[in-house]
Amino acid sequence: MDLATRLDTFPGIGPARAKALARLGLETVGDLLSYYPRAYEDRTRMYTISNAPADLPVCVSAMVADSPSVSRIRKGLNVTKCRIVDHTGSAQVTFFNQDYVRHALIPGESYIFYGKLEVMGRHRQFTNPVFEREGRTRFTGRIMPVYPLTAGVSNNLLAGLALPCVETCAQLVPDRLPSGVRLAHGLCTAEYACQNVHFPADQEALDVARRRLVFEELFFLSCGMAFLRRRRAGAEGRTLPRREPREFLSLLPFTPTGAQLRAMEEIAGDLSSGRPMNRLVQGDVGSGKTAVAAYAAWTAYAAGVQTAMMAPTEILAHQHFDTLNKLLSPAGMKIGLLTGSMKAAEKRSVRTALAAGEIHLIVGTHALLSEGVEYADLGLVITDEQHRFGVGQRSALSSKAKTAPHVLVMSATPIPRTLALLIYGDLDVTVMDELPPGRTPVETYLVGEDKRQRMYQFVRKNVAQGRQVYVICPAVEEGEGSDLKAVTAYAKVLSQQVFPDLRVGFVHGKLKAREKEAVMSAFAGGELDVLVSTTVVEVGVDVPNASLMIIENAERFGLSQLHQLRGRVGRGRWQSYCVLITDNRAQETLERLRYFTKTTDGFKIAEKDLELRGPGDFFGQRQHGLPNLRSADLAGDTRVLKEAQDAAGELLQADQFLAAPEHQGVMERIKQLFAEDGDIFN
């Protein structure tokens, strides 16, 4: 057996199981060894039947006292029971739908049982425990790994596969960390880390293994990001001459904030530097990022090059098109729109005008990346809500330019500095931390189910004043979680029973693009009083008349997502409100939601969210263009991140291109990590 040995050659792994394993990315021994557990069960603590604590997973050594009996409760459900004893007492063991137990548990033999012991008076019972014959134990009496699973793959199957692989092949795992770096930072070997991340000898061994793996992952990531930065620093970009912002400011219907002027100044410096701009403009909802993007496009137009602006949704693309058209057409700019739902003839006409250079700024969705979209001379790429695209799509749009284009990324998702260092390691960051004058902070309240009727009255009060209301639900249809408010059913209840006299509409991600557009447009145009929706409105239309945001089952959302939703209101001149509704009584949940009601600072909220939930909440799976992190938790591992970044910096200072033979392993690992962006090293 070696790292390339296929898992389908193992006994018990037929085609169906091999297919299920492949869904997890597990095809070889090497894949399995780098597939780390998500948690651990401590099965080292042994108890007797009488002194085992109730409702905590424990191991008990006991003898089977009688033959297991099987009874059928109803079709599809049978129960197997038997009695187990030790010198302190007896307990009943119950298994549901596990017929094999009848033959596996032999009276008179001793077994180790692992599970929760339920205590009801003098009666003690295990339900569906794990068990192994005493003297032949593999998965009891040790710290047991718990792996991420999929349908058709049980934890026992994965652990049973991993054990022989670790025992035989841990020493074959290549140690790509340079020995100097490993020793300087007091890290264990790759072999020790592999053995103890899967089957730790004890908690201390697990901590040592995990520290090594976290450091290694962040070290290679930091090296890769340094390569991205260096490629950018060395690249030649077209020089777009500086233009006096005063001329642009005369186009604006408002006085820009200091933060907006600072961002424009930084962009002007980038565009005229002779190097490709790669800048992230990060600021809360309503901080005025669109005007900054308009300034960049206006500068590009004056220099005779085209701008492409990509938005994550058609609704947002339309909104940007309308805003930019009003703002920039008086300056002589021709703005175009390209989305997937446009008619074929419309698309053809836009593509022709774009290729001929008649469109100076094109706004669109992913349609801008599609084949057949050509530019006369693309000089600036702007992407909105970066975390929905990722590095790959950013470079796909850039590849449509003849020479390296300038890139401006806008994000309304405040991101903690630690995370920004990694995700945007190849970008310069501008933070817009100032809201335009006259924006009143949104008042936020947390209420329980008992206040629902009062909340409905508050909806009526807002509508009576001529305002509009958002109601956000976590689910689309009934059955996606029986306790969750579902958009379609709830909208029906609101329109027929609660507010029969109001105009109620609903929208969710499963509607066809055209239907979605129609409802959102109706709401934006004031034709609906209440819009029931999923988080599809998170980056939706700008409706200054909406003054109330109600979020059902608020505990289901991350703080950053709640902040994005709250940003949909408070855009007009009226006092706006955000009401979180939850019947969850868990202390931790309530504290988290109360924290949210007390601050409107997006960056503080993002820091708290990262601390509480980890980075997954910011970017759904694989959306951010970063390699997947297998070990590192960016909230908890900030100290290791700093250490790894310093070590990467030192190594690259000593060997800029990682050309030394002892650094070949580092280079290989970086290339693997950034496989989706392999061209960054060419």
Image (tube, rainbow, N blue to C red):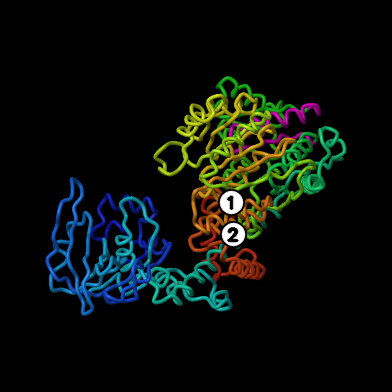
Would you say residue 328 sits in the magenta stretch? yes
Name the foreground residue: 473 vs 509. 473
Which residue type does callout 2 highlight? Gly
Residue 493 lies, in percent from the top left, at: 47, 31
Q: Which of the two discs, 1 and 2, labels the residue nearer the N terminus?
A: 2
* Residue at 59% over, 42% down: 396
Residue 145 lies, in percent from the top left, at: 38, 66
Is residue 575 rendered to the left or right of residue 588? right
Is residue 350 rendered to the left or right of residue 105? right
Which residue type does callout 1 highlight? Leu
Q: Is residue 270 above or below residue 189?
A: above
Is residue 175 rendered to the left or right of residue 57? right
Which residues are drawn in magenta? Answer: 303-332
Q: Is residue 605 above or below residue 223?
A: above
Name the foreground residue: 655 vs 197. 197
* Residue at 60% over, 62% down: 222
Residue lying at the far top of the rendered structure = 345
Q: Is residue 88 above or below residue 539?
A: below
Between disc 1 and disc 2, the foreground one is 1
Query: Which disc number belongs to residue 551?
Result: none
Would you say residue 562 sits in the magenta stretch? no
Residue 452 lies, in percent from the top left, at: 53, 40
Query: Which disc number belongs to residue 559?
Result: 1
Q: Is residue 240 visible?
A: yes
Is residue 253 rendered to the left or right of residue 632? right
Q: Is residue 625 visible?
A: no
Q: Name the main secondary structure of what is drawn in magenta.
A: helix
Q: In which quarter of the view is residue 355 placed?
A: top right
Name the foreground residue: 350 vs 609. 609
Distance Cα–Cα, label 1 vs label 2: 30 Å
Q: Which residue is mark 2?
A: 224
Q: In which quarter of the view is residue 645 placed?
A: bottom right
